[in-house]
Image (cartoon, rainbow, N blue to C red):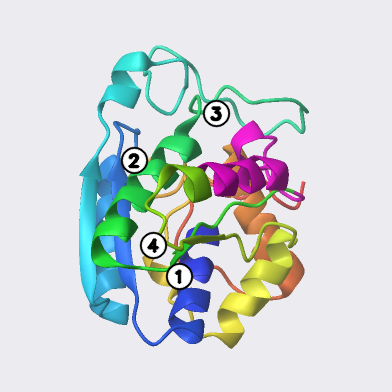
């Protein structure tokens, strides 16, 4: 959901966009890839790239990539959750920087959220500020790539409202950590998404097995 709205912002603010997607062995990899293809059909990016990072699954350490680890229902527990994929966003941004430098793109958009998210350390603003320094020093002198995090300080409900104003196709987004057919409605990501739609006063266009966001 956050990445979808970020894509809509990028489309709004630029004359040309390119879309990149990463498969890293996540449980809902198939559905997320379908969502990516649907978004490409909707927005018609100039270029698209699908990156294979299956080694993140082999590294393990996350319930998103290791079926032996349990994805818990949302319980409000603070701290870094078991669904954190170690250093994932740094790897995703690094791949995007490599591509951006080749195609001469000058901005990389990522839909990270710090204030109303799940406690992932690689979603913090300071993390992306330091990544920007690495980009500046690790690319050619002629390269000028800005890392853009437009929703990082937004509440989830406000992200929904912004997406509605931008006519973002929420029906093509997928947030569930567990399922690829019907969203579970009880994992942390489903909970935060459903709560955001409820607070925004908008119906979520995808279906759920259960909705605990109001409990």
Identify the secondary structure beneath mark 1. Answer: helix
Instruction: Give the Cα separation between the discs numbered 1 and 2.
Output: 20 Å
Say which residue label 2 marks: 28
- The percent coordinates of residue 17 (x first, y second) are 34, 75
Say which residue label 1 marks: 7
Farthest top residue in view = 68
Residue 157 appears left or right of 210: right
Identify the secondary structure beneath mark 3. Answer: loop
The magenta segment is 115-134
Say which residue label 3 marks: 84
Say which residue label 4 marks: 142
Q: Name which residue lies at 53% across and 28% down.
A: 83
- The percent coordinates of residue 123 (x first, y second) are 63, 43
Q: Is residue 131 magenta?
A: yes
Q: In front of the other: label 4 or label 3?
A: 4
Residue 165 appears left or right of 135: right
Q: In terms of sequence position, does the residue under pointer 3 or pointer 1 come before the other?
A: 1
Q: In terms of sequence position, does the residue under pointer 3 or pointer 2 come before the other?
A: 2
Camera-side residue of 61 and 149: 149
Q: In front of the other: label 3 or label 2?
A: 3
């Amino acid at each position: 959901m956050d990445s979808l709205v970020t894509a809509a912002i990028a489309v709004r603010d630029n004359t040309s966009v390119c879309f990149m997607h990463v498969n890293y062995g996540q449980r809902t990899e198939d559905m997320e890839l379908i969502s990516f293809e649907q978004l490409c059909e909707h927005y018609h990016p100039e270029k698209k790239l699908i990156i294979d990072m299956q080694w993140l699954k082999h590294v393990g350490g996350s319930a998103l990539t290791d079926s032996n680890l349990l994805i818990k229902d949302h319980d409000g527990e603070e701290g870094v959750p078991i669904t954190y994929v170690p250093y994932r966003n740094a790897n995703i941004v690094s791949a995007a920087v490599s591509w951006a430098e080749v195609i001469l793109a000058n901005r990389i958009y990522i839909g990270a959220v710090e204030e109303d998210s799940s406690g992932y350390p690689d979603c913090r603003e300071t993390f992306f500020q330091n990544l920007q320094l690495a980009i500046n020093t690790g690319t050619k002198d002629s390269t000028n790539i800005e890392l853009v995090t437009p929703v990082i300080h937004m509440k989830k409900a406000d992200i929904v409202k912004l997406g509605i104003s931008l006519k973002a196709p929420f029906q093509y987004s997928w947030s569930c950590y567990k399922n690829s057919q019907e969203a579970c409605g009880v994992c942390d990501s489903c909970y935060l998404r459903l709560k955001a739609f409820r607070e925004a006063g908008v119906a979520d266009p995808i279906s759920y097995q259960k909705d605990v966001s109001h409990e």
